Amino acid sequence: MARLAGRKILITGGASGIGRATARLCAGEGAAVAVLDRSAEAAQEVAGGIGGHAFVADVADHGSVDAAVEAAATAMGGLDGVVNAAGIFSSEGLTETSAELFNRILTVNLTGTFLVIRAAERFLRAADSASVVNIGSGVGLIPTGPGSTAYVASKGGVIALTRVLAMELAPKIRVNVVCPGMVDTAMTESFLRDNQGGIRSELAARYALGRAAEPEELARAILFLLSEEASFITGIALPVDGGRTYH
Ligand SMILES: NC(=O)c1ccc[n+]([C@@H]2O[C@H](COP(=O)([O-])OP(=O)(O)OC[C@H]3O[C@@H](n4cnc5c(N)ncnc54)[C@H](O)[C@@H]3O)[C@@H](O)[C@H]2O)c1
């Protein structure tokens, strides 16, 4: 029996990395999937490969979010799952972080998560039961060193937002946040490129499991939280970080 048979799931950031792996896994488990991303071509490619739907929107723009979420719910005949995987990174510390950069990171990562859930709320409430899975970060739980000021603040915000919405949207809608460590995606590649790649092994050594995750390893945790197997789990921040959080 497919674990998400009959489910209707919207995945932001579904054109790449963790979102793309989740879109493919959810479709493989029987769900109808809508991929929402700012990158039209990549979103269409992912959706086309899984028989899903693609919608182009900037999660930071409430007008385009409202329109895309409504279109996704219409296309699938409802909505009972949302995965907020759209996100951007910046490694700058306090001194290098301009007000504009800080606002941009917060607006995409935190406000974007809020806007998507707000737009989806009426559809999720109409379902028998529903699940929202946000993507935070291990650094949103425990910053592991100086730097990435705006990014860390945004992910701490996503974790707090998750906890309050778990209470607001209960009992029909569960809300959880997955907190990854380093994952092999375009985001990580670009960070490592900016740092000449030399720190990959040094970073990997800080994980109990000694490596970065594959995006599919995050997708499996997200699938669990979306599914009825997690029917009594809400408001949790689940580290999926190969042991990094506990070092
Ligand atoms: N890669 C990691 O090591 C890591 C670690 C912890 C947390 N995360 C988080 O996981 C999530 C997914 O990251 P990833 O590594 O898969 O990155 P990625 O860059 O591979 O994918 C991010 C996707 O989000 C989309 N996106 C970005 N801004 C958007 C916007 N304003 N509107 C719509 N779509 C937008 C991009 O087009 C892209 O398809 C992010 O929230 C990220 O912060 C990643």
Image (cartoon, rainbow, N blue to C red):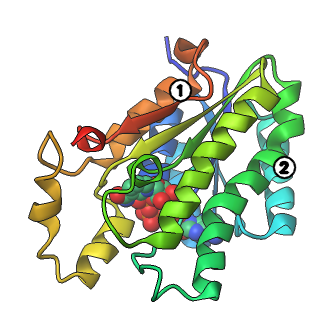
Q: Quadrant of residue 188?
A: bottom left
Left or right: residue 122 compared with residue 156: right
Quarter where residue 166 is shown:
top right
- Residue nearer the viewer, 12 or 94: 94
Where residue 176 appears, as percent x and y from the top left, is 59, 33
Quarter of the image with the C terminus in it: top left
The structure residue drawn at horizontal position 29% and vertical position 71%, both measured from the top left corner, is 189
Q: Residue at x 15, y 40 (%)?
A: 208
Determine crowd level at label 1: few under 14, some 14-19, many 20+ residues with C-alpha closer than 10 A: many
**Front one among 152 and 193:** 152
Query: Disc 2 or 1, which lies upstream in sequence?
Result: 2
For badge 2, the amino acid type reads Ala
* Residue 87 locus on image (x, y percent): 54, 63
From this viewpoint, is residue 55 visible? Answer: no
In the rendered view, would you say 162 is above or below 197? above
Q: Amino acid at mark 1?
A: Leu
